[in-house]
Amino acid sequence: MSGSTESGAAAASEGVQVVRLGEADGARYELDEEALRRVLLRPGVQELPAVVVSVAGAYRGGKSFILDFFLRYLTAPLSSQLSGEWLGKEDEQLKGFHWRGGAERDTTGIHLWSEPIVTTLANGEKVAVLLMDTQGTFDSESTIGQNSTVFALSTLISSVQIYNLHANIKEDDLQNLQLFTEYGKLVCEAEGKAFQTLLFLVRDWMFHYEHAYGFVGGAELLSKRLESKPNQNAELREVREHINSSFEQIKCFLTPHPGLTVADKNFAGCIRDLTQDFRSALLQLVPALFDPDHLTPKLVNGERVRMQDLFDYFQQYVGIFNSGEVPEAVTIFRATADACLMAAARAARGVYAAHMGAATGGACSHTARALQAAHSGARAAAAHAYSQKRKLGSQEDADTKLEDLLKELDGGLSKYILENEAKVRETMSRAKKTYDAAVSS
Ligand code: GDP
Ligand code: MG
């Protein structure tokens, strides 16, 4: 089954870099807050639960290339999603995120597709799909710190992390997951697991007579690789033992080589140049990824993360990865808990504003007492909304955040008082004009 999409990738849509290597110090990452806001705070999208699909892995592994097929699928009409026509015309160039065959790499960092795609879950709920392209992980030119940063950031922020691998799942590839299994152990007391979906996407799989292309062969390979064996290095054994408690779902998909023409200088991504096996793999993989029954919204502690809330997660995570060393799991946990509190406070602020809007909106002025009563009611509703949200971390932090929020709302009452006074003056001046007109006639 396919999801129905409601927004096409307009001509102006593009990959937008939101995380980049800082200029001052080559090892530090910078968040482009303006660019991030433009993507996350789009009208009609900012309030929706986010499904964040990231592709991460080595440079020149075909990450951007496959993301462009995701885009094709997501922006195709339902009929062509169902018929398979979404794959494109034989001679249609592949566009979207920048992919290339050259020897130089694209800018290190994280790119988002500028237009999140609104789609519908099987239960009818609307969600926004955010596609995330990463660059800089495990490149030969990057330092260890840089390698793990982009991979870690994208794993922490996404709800579907596609770990793009060449030819096989190797021990090193599993080693890179160590930080997340440690973090996962910390989170496992909370509601749900730390992460949602991890998909090992093995490209150029050569042993299809041993394990067939697709999800079935992938599952076989994965279970072999995750099997614990005696004499294994302790860290890797930990990863193998805990990976299932960190991710709600772990899958593996094996893709064939796309065909020798992909190495050609003039290859433009047209499907006429792709082997039948590779096309079949795309036709199996992509619709399964975005199947409304399996789309995974981003959850933190069991709470949906809305598009606008992702901003805090980006900010928190980039912050901790900029502190020099690779952060420890407990630092990530605190950063997540902080962003989670910010999201709860933002939702509560929205409740307050909605209540005040309903009580004081319109042209009529209100008495000071009525205004105070509206504020008290709205404040209580906001506090209730805040208390209903599941939060990570200590109760003390949650209480402090609530106190700060209530102080902020109390402080904001003066804005409503000023607006009300303006309405009173307006009413009086109108009344005076009416009176003057009546007297002079
Ligand atoms: P990225 O750096 O991981 O984003 O890689 P790109 O998407 O820019 O692709 C790099 C090169 O790999 C391009 O020339 C693609 O045509 C080619 N390519 C795409 N998919 C595959 C694949 O599955 N296998 C192989 N061998 N090459 C691929
Ligand atoms: Mg790329």
Image: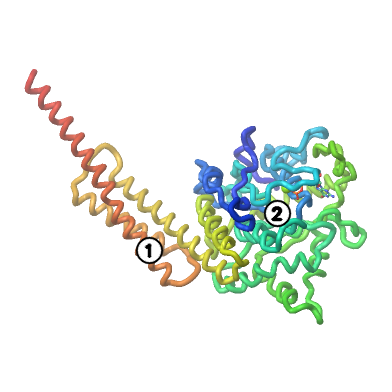
Towards the viewer: 50 or 63: 63
The amino acid type of the residue labelled 2 equals Gly
- Residue 378 spot, x, y in % from top left: 32, 54
* Observer able to see residue 281: yes
- Asked if one can make out residue 159 in the rendered structure from this viewpoint, the answer is no
Residue type, mark 1 in image: Leu
Residue depicted at 56% across the width and 72% down the height = 330
Instruction: Classify 143 as above or below 125.
Output: below
Residue at 78% over, 52% down: 61
Q: Which tag is nearer the camera, tag 2 or tag 1? A: 2
For residue 56, what is the image quadrant?
bottom right
Q: How many marks?
A: 2
Mark closest to the chain's N terminus, 2 or 1 = 2
Question: Is 383 situated left or right of 39 in this image?
Answer: left
- Picture coordinates of residue 224, whole percent (x, y): 82, 70
Q: Which residue position is annotated with label 2? A: 136
On whether ligand 1 comes within 8 Å of the CB at mark 2, the answer is no
Residue 307 on image: x %, y %: 53, 50
Q: Secondary structure at mark 1?
A: helix
- Which residue is outermost to the left? 439
